[in-house]
Image (spheres, grey):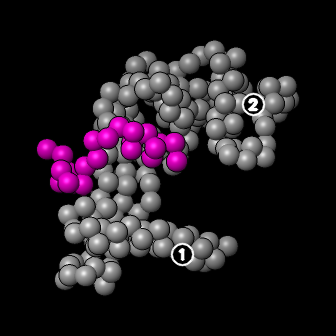
Amino acid sequence: MNYPPKHHQDYNKNHMIEVLKTYPLATVISVKDNQPFITHLPLIYKNEKLVGHIDINNPQAQLLKNNNDITVIFGGPECYISPSIYSATQLPTWNYIKVHLKGNVNAIEDKAALKQSLITMTEFLEAPNHNYTLEANNPRLDANLKYIEMFEITITNWEGKFKLSQDKKPTDMEAARQELIRANQISIQQFLETIF
């Protein structure tokens, strides 16, 4: 049984791919001997696969190979929704966008492929302005290749969890959408001012 309820599930793969592309920092979860290993890494989606890189000193690196099972979670925007934004009486709730993926992971041992993948990922993450280009002849890049492992995840299951007040009437759904935009802009600024 899927949760949240069906009206909060998004089965449109293109919507889920947009989350992966817009919010590429993923929570990567592996399990060994009933012990979870969790790392947060940017992953790039291409041709039904996810590509990532991990520090060889990270204990999870040993689990990102040999066709091991893996779970990956991508998170989009989220916020508290006050009943005050709705036109009818409601209870408080939390709206969010999450994508849960399951798959099989394998290491890519080729250092030339790793180097090109790091360049390609930097290109993707620098879009649309491309203020920085990771050059293939960068000596720091070459010096660090031995400390990085590349892996590829073949996705076997997609789940979109888009809780966006879809069970409300259209005007309230739009109010929740606007609140999600407003709250994220304000909360980021306030949060950063608190911790910096």
For badge 1, the amino acid type reads Ile
Q: Quadrant of the C terminus?
A: bottom right
Q: Earlier in the sequence, mark 1 or mark 2?
A: 2
Residue bearing the label numbered 1: 186
Q: Position of residue 32 (x, y in %)?
A: 36, 32
Q: Is residue 187 above or below residue 52?
A: below
How many numbered discs, if any? Answer: 2
Residue 18 placement (x, y as % from top left): 46, 44
Q: Which mark is residue 144?
A: 2
For residue 2: magenta?
yes
Q: Position of residue 171 (x, y in %)?
A: 29, 72
| Residue 38 can be seen in this image | no
Tell me if I can see residue 172 in this picture: yes
Q: Are marks 1 and 2 in contact (CB under 8 Å)?
A: no
Label 1 to label 2: alpha-carbon separation = 38 Å
Q: Is residue 101 left or right of residue 111?
A: left
Q: Quadrant of residue 91?
A: bottom left
Q: Secondary structure at mark 1?
A: helix
Could you say where residue 39 lies in the image, as x and y percent from the top left? 49, 43
> Is 162 situated left or right of 29 in this image?
left
Whether residue 181 is situated above or below residue 13 in the rendered picture: below
Q: Residue at x 78, y 46 (%)?
A: 131
The stretch of residues the image draws in magenta is 1-22
- Which amino acid type is shown beneath numbered disc 2? Asn
